[in-house]
Structure formats: structure tokens, C-alpha cells
Amino acid sequence: MNKRINLKNSPILVRATATEREKIKAKAAEKELSISRFAVEKCLEDEPFTTKTEKDLLKKILFELRKSGGNLNQIAHNFNLARLTDAPTPTTSEVKKAAKSIQNLIEVIKTKL
């Protein structure tokens, strides 16, 4: 007797739009997996989805990074201006403040990676 043992006998129904199904199908094909196998592997990943809290944190980080980039840009502009004219150069505390701001963002990003 040659009975085939089916270990994958617990179906899960997932509803998707036709567009979503085609996107999932394409991604599964890229990985050379069936849609079912692709879905199972994606769902079993440690962190397959970004939570709302993570999205909010990433938005805050992006906002702070843009602010820090703007501050750094102003400091660079003022240094270049001082080199060409007799304008005063940015103070050490201004440079340190901008550098500390960027360093803090780097630390937050490292903890999330």
C-alpha cells in the first residue's frame, strides 16, 4: 500500500482583491514559490509587517532627520560664507548641537534595525 501522507492539510482562507492577488502571485513567482507557500512563509517571518507604532516612530525619525539635515546645511552654508567674506563662523556649540542631534537619530535607527 502506497498511501500518500499529506502533512499540509489545514487550509486557511484569505480574501484579497483581484489586484492584490496578482501582486501576491507575482511576488510568489519571483521567489519561485506557490502562492500558498509564499503566504505561509511571509506570515511566519519574525516581523512581517510594520505596526502603527513603528510607522509613527519612523515618521518622527524622518521629521527629526530632515530638521537635523537643515541645521547641518545652514552650518555648512555659514562656514562657506565666512570663508568668502568676513562673516563670523558658526560656534563650536552650534556644530556640536547639530552633530549630537544626528548622533541621537543614528542611535534610534540602530535600535530599530
Image (spheres, grey):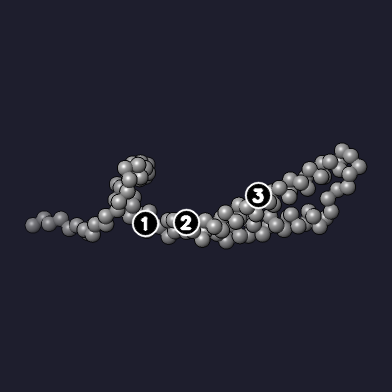
The quadrant in which the N terminus is found is bottom left
Residue 33 in the image, given as x and y percentages of width and height:
32, 46
**Residue found at x 33% / y 45%:** 17
Q: Is residue 12 left or right of residue 66?
A: left
Q: Find numbered disc 2 in the image and state the secondary structure of the residue it sits on.
A: loop
Q: Secondary structure at mark 3?
A: helix
Instruction: Give me the disc on residue 66.
Output: 3
Instruction: Find the residue positioned furthest to the right.
Output: 86
Q: Circle 2 is placed at which residue position?
A: 50
Kindly tell me whether residue 84 is visible in this rendering.
yes
The tag earlier along the polypeptide, 2 or 3, is 2
Res 101 → quadrant: bottom right
Check disc 1 and report the residue beneath it.
Answer: 43
Which label lies toward us, 1 or 3? Answer: 3
Instruction: Left or right? Give the position of 7 relative to 37.
Output: left
Identify the amino acid type marked 3. Arg
Marks 1 and 2 sit apart, C-alpha to C-alpha, by 13 Å
- Mark nearest the camera among 1 and 2 is 2
The amino acid at mark 2 is: Thr
Rendered-image quadrant of the C terminus: bottom right
Q: Quadrant of residue 81?
A: top right
Q: Residue furthest top?
A: 84
